[in-house]
Image (cartoon, helix red, strand yellow):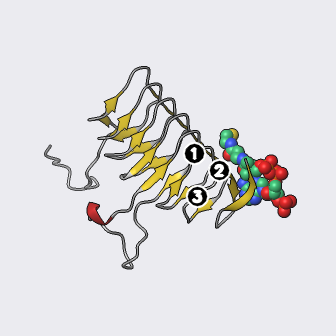
Amino acid sequence: MQNDDSSAPQYRKLACRVVDITCGQGVTIVEPANLYGCTLEDGVFVGPFVEVQRNAVIGARTRIQSHSFICEKVTIGTDCFIGHGVMFINDLFKDGHPTYDVDAMLKTCIGNHVSIGSNATILPVTICDHTVIGAGAVVTKAIATPGIYAGNPARLIRPL
Ligand SMILES: CC(C)(COP(=O)(O)OP(=O)(O)OC[C@H]1O[C@@H](n2cnc3c(N)ncnc32)[C@H](O)[C@@H]1OP(=O)(O)O)[C@@H](O)C(=O)NCCC(=O)NCCS
C-alpha cells in the first residue's frame, strides 16, 4: 500500500495471526495469539499473547498459558502444563550473534505430563516424562530422571 504522507513512520505492520496450523479436535486458542505452521493435537489450550512458531508440536491436552513463547524445533508431549511466560530457546548465540539458519537451530523435546512453572526458561534440552520445573527456573541441561527441578541453573529439589 502506498503511503503518501512522508512524515508518517515507515514500518511494516504484521497482524497477530493464526495461519497454516494443523489442529486436532477441541482445540482452544485465545486471541491475540501468533501461531504459524505448528501442530496442536486434540484438546490443546493456548492462552492469549502466546507465540508458537512453525514446526513446533504441542501434544494432546497440553495447556499453554498466556505470554509463553514456543519456538521452532520444540516438541511438547501430551498432558503438559506450560505456565505463564515460559520461554523456549533454539539459538544459543554460540557464534556471538543470533543465527537465522534454521538448520543450525537446536531442538527441545518435552515429555508427557511435564509441568513448567511461570517464567521458566528452557534451553534446547530433553525433559523426561513426569517432571516439574519450578517457577523462574533456567533449565540448561537434559533432565532424564522424573522429579522437581528449580533454580538457575535448574537442579533437582526432590524426586517424584
Ligand atoms: C519448584 C516447586 C514445585 C517446589 O515446590 P516444593 O517441592 O513444595 O518445594 P518447597 O516449597 O518445599 O521448597 C524447597 C526448596 O526449594 C526452594 N524453591 C521452591 N521453589 C523454587 C523456585 N521456583 N525456584 C528456586 N527455588 C525454589 C525453596 O526456597 C526451598 O529452599 P530451601 O530448602 O533452601 O528453603 C514450586 O515452588 C514452584 O516453583 N512451582 C511452580 C508453580 C507455578 O509456576 N505454577 C504456575 C501456575 S500459577
Q: Is residue 56 above or below residue 102?
A: above
- Give yes or no for contact between labels 1 and 2 (Cβ–Cβ under 8 Å): yes
Residue lying furthest front: 145
Indicate the secondary structure of the residue bearing disc 2: loop
- Give yes or no for contact between labels 2 and 3 (Cβ–Cβ under 8 Å): no
Amino acid residing under circle 3: Ile
Q: Is residue 129 above or below residue 28?
A: below
Gap in Å between the C-alphas at discs 3 and 1?
Answer: 9 Å
| Lower sequence index among marks 1 and 2 | 1
* Residue tagged 3: 143
Between 82 and 14, the one lying in front of the other is: 82
Gap in Å between the C-alphas at discs 2 and 3?
Answer: 8 Å
Indicate the secondary structure of the residue bearing disc 1: loop
> Looking at the image, which residue is at 61% across and 52% down?
119
Amino acid residing under circle 1: Asp
* Residue tagged 2: 146
| Lower sequence index among marks 3 and 1 | 1
Q: Quadrant of residue 92?
A: bottom left
Q: Quadrant of residue 39?
A: top left
* Residue tagged 1: 129
Where residue 146 sits in the image (x, y, percent)? 65, 50
**Location of the N terminus (image quadrant):** top left
Can residue 100 be seen from the camera position used here?
Answer: no
Label 2 beta carbon less than 8 Å to ligand 1: no
Q: On the picture, is 27 further left or further right than 23? A: right
Where residue 49 sits in the image (x, y, percent)? 48, 40
> Looking at the image, which residue is at 41% across and 50% down?
74
